[in-house]
Amino acid sequence: MKFPSKEKIEMLRKMYPAGTKLELLSMDDVQAPPVGTIGTVDGIDDAGQIMVTWKNGSSLSLIPGVDGFRKVGGEKMTKEVRDAILKVRDSGRTNMMDARMVQYIANEMGLYELVIYILS
């Protein structure tokens, strides 16, 4: 697995500061908390994993781009996210309704604000 850039890790730390509440949507791990479990972000490690304390007592970290999760309470769209959406759209590489592919392309293009927005 390739480690994320320092820029991407800093972006994750801005988007998911300690104390942020997350809901688990999917995780392919036998020790994963049940889908729908709420957790609190403890921090982002140097590998870009989101360290979480889950309500069920688990402390299994999330891997952005692999595990499915969202911020509890939602996230408002910023100008940067809107501009990133338009860049992906203008590339013509995917149907914009395919969120996973939009996220993949945004990651390739270095549009980390959009990658994180889609995750939240």
Image (cartoon, helix red, strand yellow):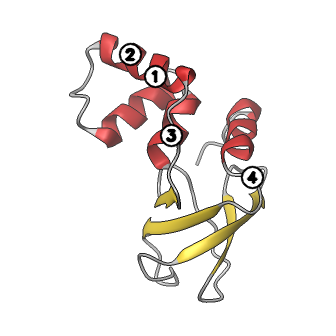
Asked if 69 appears above or below 6 in the picture, the reply is below
* Residue for badge 1: 82
State the CA–CA distance, disc 2 to disc 4.
Answer: 27 Å
- The x, y position of residue 16, in whole percent, is 68, 51
In this rendering, the answer to whether 23 lies above or below 71 is: below
Task: Give the residue type at disc 4.
Answer: Pro
Q: Earlier in the sequence, mark 2 or mark 4?
A: 4
Q: CA distance from mark 2 to mark 1?
A: 6 Å
Name the image quarter holding residue 20: bottom right
- Please tell me which residue is depicted at 52% across the width and 39% down the height of the picture: 76
Kindly identify the residue that appears in the image at 63 percent across and 75 percent down: 60
User: Is 36 on the left or on the right of 99, as rendered?
Assistant: right
Q: Name which of mark 3 and mark 1 comes first in the sequence.
A: 1
Using the image as rendered, state which of residue 11 and residue 32 is in the foreground. Answer: 11
Q: Position of residue 94 (x, y in %)?
A: 24, 25
Type of amino acid at the residue the image marks with label 1: Arg
Q: Tell which circle, 1 or 4, labels the residue nearer the N-terminal end.
A: 4
Q: Which residue is mark 2?
A: 86
Disc 3 crowd, CA 10 A, few/some/many (<14, 14-19, 20+): some
